[in-house]
Amino acid sequence: MTAASHSEAMTGGASVTGRSVVTFGETMALFGAVGTGSLAHTPTAQLGMGGAESNVAIALRRLGVEVSWFGRLGHDSMGDLIERQLRAEGITAGIIRDRDAATGLMVKERRTATTTRVWYYRTGSAGSRLSISDIPEHWLEEATLLHITGITPALSDSARETTLECVRRARALGVPVSFDLNYRGALWSPEQARPVYRQLIAMSDIVFAGADEAAIAVGAAEPVGLIRRLRTLGPAEVVIKLGDRGTIADIDGILHTVAAIPVSVVDSVGAGDGFVAGYLAERLAGKPSAERLQTAVTVGAFACTVPGDWEGMPRRDELGLLTVGEPVAR
Amino acid sequence: MTAASHSEAMTGGASVTGRSVVTFGETMALFGAVGTGSLAHTPTAQLGMGGAESNVAIALRRLGVEVSWFGRLGHDSMGDLIERQLRAEGITAGIIRDRDAATGLMVKERRTATTTRVWYYRTGSAGSRLSISDIPEHWLEEATLLHITGITPALSDSARETTLECVRRARALGVPVSFDLNYRGALWSPEQARPVYRQLIAMSDIVFAGADEAAIAVGAAEPVGLIRRLRTLGPAEVVIKLGDRGTIADIDGILHTVAAIPVSVVDSVGAGDGFVAGYLAERLAGKPSAERLQTAVTVGAFACTVPGDWEGMPRRDELGLLTVGEPVAR
Amino acid sequence: MTAASHSEAMTGGASVTGRSVVTFGETMALFGAVGTGSLAHTPTAQLGMGGAESNVAIALRRLGVEVSWFGRLGHDSMGDLIERQLRAEGITAGIIRDRDAATGLMVKERRTATTTRVWYYRTGSAGSRLSISDIPEHWLEEATLLHITGITPALSDSARETTLECVRRARALGVPVSFDLNYRGALWSPEQARPVYRQLIAMSDIVFAGADEAAIAVGAAEPVGLIRRLRTLGPAEVVIKLGDRGTIADIDGILHTVAAIPVSVVDSVGAGDGFVAGYLAERLAGKPSAERLQTAVTVGAFACTVPGDWEGMPRRDELGLLTVGEPVAR
Amino acid sequence: MTAASHSEAMTGGASVTGRSVVTFGETMALFGAVGTGSLAHTPTAQLGMGGAESNVAIALRRLGVEVSWFGRLGHDSMGDLIERQLRAEGITAGIIRDRDAATGLMVKERRTATTTRVWYYRTGSAGSRLSISDIPEHWLEEATLLHITGITPALSDSARETTLECVRRARALGVPVSFDLNYRGALWSPEQARPVYRQLIAMSDIVFAGADEAAIAVGAAEPVGLIRRLRTLGPAEVVIKLGDRGTIADIDGILHTVAAIPVSVVDSVGAGDGFVAGYLAERLAGKPSAERLQTAVTVGAFACTVPGDWEGMPRRDELGLLTVGEPVAR
Amino acid sequence: MTAASHSEAMTGGASVTGRSVVTFGETMALFGAVGTGSLAHTPTAQLGMGGAESNVAIALRRLGVEVSWFGRLGHDSMGDLIERQLRAEGITAGIIRDRDAATGLMVKERRTATTTRVWYYRTGSAGSRLSISDIPEHWLEEATLLHITGITPALSDSARETTLECVRRARALGVPVSFDLNYRGALWSPEQARPVYRQLIAMSDIVFAGADEAAIAVGAAEPVGLIRRLRTLGPAEVVIKLGDRGTIADIDGILHTVAAIPVSVVDSVGAGDGFVAGYLAERLAGKPSAERLQTAVTVGAFACTVPGDWEGMPRRDELGLLTVGEPVAR
Amino acid sequence: MTAASHSEAMTGGASVTGRSVVTFGETMALFGAVGTGSLAHTPTAQLGMGGAESNVAIALRRLGVEVSWFGRLGHDSMGDLIERQLRAEGITAGIIRDRDAATGLMVKERRTATTTRVWYYRTGSAGSRLSISDIPEHWLEEATLLHITGITPALSDSARETTLECVRRARALGVPVSFDLNYRGALWSPEQARPVYRQLIAMSDIVFAGADEAAIAVGAAEPVGLIRRLRTLGPAEVVIKLGDRGTIADIDGILHTVAAIPVSVVDSVGAGDGFVAGYLAERLAGKPSAERLQTAVTVGAFACTVPGDWEGMPRRDELGLLTVGEPVAR
């Protein structure tokens, strides 16, 4: 076993492909309140990290897919923490440690058992200073797929240019592009997001969106209507995530619906990212559409059962743990 | 903005009236076990505070109502903690720090996830030494409403006299009186409580009671029967709290029933106090009966979702958070 | 009150019999992760103890039954912890502290809210070195019942011999024998277990088993079929535990089914042991079969509501707490 | 090994005598703040127990001395906790669970790293209701020594009578009496304490006191002067505890001084009780005066190194751990 | 007792003056690591608050001085937390809740037991948007003293203008001005700070500085030389803080030196602010210079003994607790 | 930046060499009690990892040295945790995940503030099953140094053979060998260790030992005598670690003594490993002897200031933090 390879034990025995899914974006430090209530009554917090693209990367890696991520972190202990975790997960990362800006930060409050509020400290952060020159050399040439989100283009002009440049290069090289809209109201307005969304959707092969997010791009409609309009823009695979109501997807012209797996939700943040990873992992493994979606909802369910955005992502040999619907007293 | 006013941010943008709801009673320090099981197996506890009247006061304040509370605390760190919290919540408080008696104390065990046991250390406490001379001067003259509970008259002879004196003065000044029976078996027997309850009900405009509590006053009956008998004693508004089965009320002769909001219950203590505050806040705002009751069950539901008796009480701009029935994975 | 007696307060007012239920086995130290997720993400653990027989012993003791347990512990702080807890529970214990072997250890991970994984460090442990000479003198002569599990015979040759010797002596003295199959896949295979199970079942009066465990002994079948086959081997009382689907039993030729009590499951480990203790306590008190099974499911439900294997076991005066199905907001 | 005996492992291999030291008093539940600062800023507390006599009893037990303690506890979970701990420590206890009064309670604040403040909730507690009829039958007949403190006579009239009665019976039976003055300003004034102290000192064989406490009994003086005056009242062994300045003692007419062992103090409460136990254990083992005092300061030092009043008391085989003055990096 | 007054119990019995010390600045939310090590190994943090001026305000308030503070907070839960704490401490605060900017944030790491690292997230924060129009009306007219720090003028142009305007108005009204240089390297360079420092020193009556900070203003020199140069700029009272080496001051032309009080340092952040408050409180009470400095070092020592920047500040009746140099085992 | 390289931010800006120090051994999971006292009173534990060789590897890595480690871990969550941490630290590891044995385990008790007790569960562990075939191919060819400890040869016959084989290969390739005796009394006796120690010392270039450990190999003597005897066996560099008394070394025939850096010791385990890493890192960087030893004591001091065996190891740019002897209140 060589140092570069991810041990089988850590991926649940999945066979690991030589080439990588590639992704990039901003990963932030995250102070998450441990208790339930407003922050004034829940002073204890856990420091972790979160970022939609690195969440997807970790979930893919645990399912046995090689992943390469790049992004910027500050030259601070928050950056050290994130760099350690990405290494720990075996993500082949092109990390730039920026001496001129701090690592972005999120604060997460659990106002009630089922209501989360998040505040961002990411203006001018290292992660938002992403630029075209940060793209690792030859990075896309060995890629099996490029995954992007709608968060990165909202971070800064240079981050948007970087996103577009990566997508252009991928298309030029014939690397399929996966795009999760991931709307963040703290970063831009629907009006600002719309043209960027439409431009990126038109260049993507696979699109993931919540119903509200899809509506930003193509106008409000029922899920099937949203799918139809999105497909018109170009992508052959469109997946609408409906949270605990499951998912509806048009894959190569065939409509699929899948129910969510009922679980006791501890923290639903990251569920959408797990969903995306589950879909992509099976697609890369050449699995049929129904299996892709089934793994997608399973990984999404896992992410809900554990505090933190990515910590609960399952290894391939753990996927079966959530098929039993109910706990049994022994 | 002046120092005396409560900032808008803390009350959810509610407009604050100049005159106050007034209330009084005993607020105690509270050691609450963090874990589930008997105390012998849950050695970690959180120190907080609790008191039915101050719970109502805090909930009212967060809904934008000025509140004035008075009571006695010991000259000890438990008293300091309570004084700090009441100040923090913006309660205009007439606190007497008693050098001759300790702040009362409660110990709360979570025997099972849904069973709580409480032990009181309040015999001879500062809070029980309330007397007529403690009533702040001109206190009732500016009041919009007087809220009392059935706990205070059970604490001591002087506390009972203080309760009656406040009610008498309120009536003389035309200030409406709200009364929550709040039966405490550790303080007196149903036989001892009955005559006091009946005397206070007869002098009140609004009465809140659980079905068991109402039965102490007027004998066991179905909810509607309880309401009828209570109304006969005088009050124009009678609200029977039925816990997770909702509430039934006769308000100015019209019968209303409202279902409870289903929530994942973390700690139901304080839910009744939140209910009362929700009702009173809307009544003071001139809202119709149905809206009063709807806010009442909403605030009660909030109090259940957070550990502690009062910490989960919502600000006005948070009331909407609990209308979504189910968590949605994102 | 003498030192030897267990105070009434600790057993919920149950009358205590002079003679003892006797049991023996390995009790281990237990590091249980506090959080949910894989151990790599839940670094905080609580140190406790666990052992099927001592779980049963503690549950019996809290229900007012005198119990005597024997076993081996290492000469280490883990052994001290276990010895202290058994003393604390009032178990009349014949503990041997072994200077040549360590106390066994378990590590418990809560992978998801409803999935637990356990790793054992018990090879060559003090507890596995049990031998016939460890049986306390005159131990079975005063016994009202001998309870054994299928774990002890799997620990070592000498432990298996000790089990058989105890059963033989009990039978010779007319002491009834209760046997819980308790299959542990980490210790032996179904093939290894089968003949031992059959030998012990044939010598027992009461047999407890999960459906899967019973199938190891008598081959797979529907619950009623399993019961029939087990009864053919000898025991007059056969109880099949079906977890949250309840239980089905043949007691002296009459078939009984009982539903499980629905509770919010915190930790289901130990529920089976509580079930056994509930059944045996009522049997020793001369209660009819239906009452034995009802107390069995109630004690099992209690064990599920509290973290830890035995900490949640109820005293007799607490049994009523779980009859109310639903939490009620006050 | 029989159930009644304390395992060798738990006492560090000390030989256990058949007859007991006897003691009695009030043991209370204790909420101790985990953090440093006033309680308003250190909301997390640990629930434990404390009582000067039970602290001495536990320390003696760990040094291999049989001990019998009696006292009253409430019929509540705080009482259960204390009963469990005393059982766990192998104290042969004559516990009365009082249905008419609560277990006493202490709250402990660590205002600064070296300043502790304690508040008591013990007025009318179960522990203060001790009466002559609570003395276990034949209790003193088998005793090797009676240990009393100056706390118990301050609790109530009946507790004072019980103390005097025990001392009288001990003297009648020729059982030596050990008395630790243990002044508690919250319970009585120096003027109230003086005559009781003098009466008890006159009936004691061994007296322990801090310099301030001794001054209450015999007037202020230098340590040697205090000793001289105390000896005049009767006792042959007088030990003045000077905290971190060590101790000075007159034992059978010979003056001894011993320096304290310098340790990093975590919580000095209980150090005086450990000191007493160290002295008494060696006296009972027939050790010379110097050795008694050396063990006394060692056990006192141990009690300082661990949070809680008694948890850090050493077993006999641990006494050597504190002889190395300084930590050594390995 | 009226609502506006701070209870005597909370200030240690100090008499409260009617007029206020006035101060202003940025108070931030603070995530402080609980453990020792880099953040990657100490994931648990406590959420609190900190700000040099509010630290001084709280320490003054606890010593019995009325204080009025103004500043800006975001419309978020971090702002709620700060507003609650200032209310709790009885600071008469003119808080502006800014809807267009977030509350500033600090992250504090304890790299070793004696090394702290802090990262700020305050660029563009609400607190930095302070402007002249935020000064409460008539604010300085009733003031007894204006306290400013060198942090506020470094936050933004408008914050610097606000600082200068307040100082100008104070001088016009004859209100004495106290200035603590408080250099923050993350906000500006020594070159940027120098002219602002010199301008503010020239307009101040009392100046506090560390030796390094003084050197920024007047060039490096020995403490006495620094004092001489600073006095030349105008102020009649110059106090150089030398940390654990104590302090040296020229007060109205007389030189004083005071040793630090040796304490076990838990967290030295806030000690300088406590020092300033101790000095100012005694000055306002008309105490002589030596007493001012003695209280200053005592309050500074208190702040070191407790985690958090301000939580350990003493009430007047607690000042005596730190005169005993060493802990004494009891 | 490529994935294989360790970011500069994580090593404090140290230049990273292309070739690696190589080492191997057993790394175990570690449950460390959080509190002080015996385990029975400190139930909360933190799960981490420890292993002398991986501690050295991590400390070297943080100082900018490439390191390659190999060893065996079980196919369990404890193994996952260790694999993640080694990845996180950028150790190029040749990990074998053994399906037939569990990851070894340690339990660590803090009996007093300065006394630690450890129990091992490593008999038959995956880590002890190391064999010659586990040595990665071409592993020593690119090595700059081989570091071994005296623990590995004590684990099993195959582990001893692996150690000897590695040393032999290193010598054949001209790779210098560093040997830390690291005696573990739980694994073998001094008599068993002596011949192995002497054989390995004779084949080493650099030897590290405590005085007691050296005495096992060459008989008891004063430090200088120990050094003389060890040098006679072959190595040109002999370093005797004397804990808080510093160190004494003979390096190429010249005797050096260095004092320890006085720090507030939190956990001294790992200090010896940090010492070794500090020495080796400077030696590899071509620094003179005095500098090697100075960095050695500095890294050792760092390891003492933080809980855990390796978490406190410093990056190169942090080495200066411990030169300031005393904390200074600000």
Image (cartoon, coloured by chain):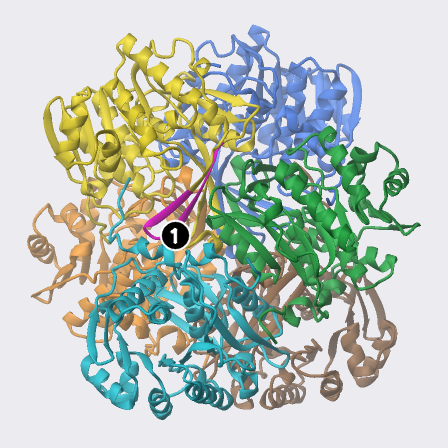
Chain colours: A brown, B green, C blue, D yellow, E cyan, F orange
Is residue C169 depicted above or below D43 in this figure?
above
Nearer to me, E52 or A229: E52
Q: Main secondary structure of the magenta part?
A: strand
Residue A19, picture quadrant: bottom right
Q: Which residue is mark 1?
A: D111
Q: Nearer the viewer, residue A64 or A50?
A: A50
Q: Measured from the top left, where is residue D177 in percent x and y?
A: 27, 18
The image shows residue D197, relative to residue E324, as above or below, that is: above
Element at label 1: strand
Q: Nearer the viewer, residue C184 or E77?
A: E77
**Residue B43 to residue D127: above or below:** below
Please report the residue visible at 73 percent of the width from the left and 17 percent of the height from the top. C232
Q: Is residue C204 magenta?
A: no
Residue range (magenta): D104-118
Which quadrant does the N terminus of chain B fall into? bottom right
Label 1, residues with CA under 10 Å away: few <14, some 14-19, many ≥20: many
Question: Which quarter of the rendering shows the C terminus of chain B?
Answer: bottom right
- Residue E211, horizontal then vertical, whole percent: 26, 79
Can residue D263 be seen in this snapshot?
yes
Question: Would you place residue D162 above or below residue E109 in this image?
Answer: above
Instruction: Name the kind of residue labelled 1 in the image.
Output: Arg
Whether residue F189 sits left or right of residue B241 in the image: it is: left
Lateral position of residue C76 relative to residue A288, left or right: left
Chain label for disc 1: D
Q: Position of residue D300 (x, y in %)?
A: 26, 37
- Place of residue C252 in the rendered image (x, y in percent of width and height, measured from the top left): 75, 14
Q: Magenta stretch containing residue D108, yes or no? A: yes
